[in-house]
Image (tube, helix red, strand yellow):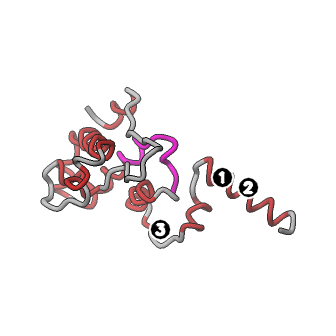
Amino acid sequence: MSLPEFKELGLALAYPKNTWAQRLPEIQDVLYVLRLTEEQRSFTSFQDVNPAYIRNTLLVAAAVSDVIYDAHQKDPEQARRIIATAIVELAPKEARCLRNQDFAAARTVLDPALENKAQEEMVDVCECESCSNLRQIAACGLACGD
């Protein structure tokens, strides 16, 4: 199955709200489970304590598995972009915020201009509803003289 097929079926990454733990996978861990690298970031340390992270990492790996091996062999950076695209596209609505470090990490691979932005600047370029509301509040405060 390919990423478009995963999306067509409505598959998305799990994003439990009642946890402190990282939920969206790191690109390095997806490469690790696909055995394209020996280095991993969080995968083995999360195996017993963060099942959502493990499921999400495996879901992204499955979504990109049809194209990732050829891409990685030709251009490892392209492989990272493919994984980042899958993370971004499979992220549920509540996770699609640039103030979410996990989501921002994937988006930064796709848009390197985000790399050096401060948290406040991320609000200005984020498309999520929460950041839109923050921009409206800030605009109202400026317009009202606060």
Q: Dot 1: what SS?
A: helix
Picture coordinates of residue 30, whole percent (x, y): 24, 51
Which residue is drawn at the image coordinates 42% and 43% (left, top)?
Answer: 91
Tell me the SS state at disc 3.
helix
Q: Position of residue 33 (x, y in %)?
A: 18, 49
Report the Cα–Cα distance between label 1 and label 2.
Answer: 6 Å
- Gap in Å between the C-alphas at discs 3 and 2? 24 Å
Farthest-out residue, top? 9
Question: Which residue is rendered at x = 23% and y = 47% of the image?
Answer: 48
* Quadrant (top left/top right/bottom left/bottom right) for the N terminus: top left
Q: In the rendered image of this protein, does residue 116 appear above or below residue 111? A: below
- The vertical placement of 135 against 8, above or below, is below
Q: What residue is shown at x 57% (from left), y 56% (from top)?
A: 126
Residue 142 horizontal/vertical position (percent): 80, 66
Q: Amino acid at mark 3?
A: Ala
Q: Quadrant of residue 143?
A: bottom right
* The magenta stretch spans residue 91: yes
Instruction: Using the image, tell me which numbered label, if any, was put on residue 113.
Output: 3
Q: Amino acid at mark 1?
A: Ser
Residue 104, quarter of picture: bottom left
Secondary structure character of the magenta stretch overall: helix
Look at label 2 and name its amino acid.
Gln
- Residue 132 disc label: 1
> CA separation, marks 3 and 1?
20 Å
Residue contact at pointers 1 and 2, CB within 8 angstroms: yes
Q: Which residues are magenta?
A: 86-98
Q: Which residue is mark 2?
A: 136
Residue 36 among magenta residues: no
Callout 2: SS: helix
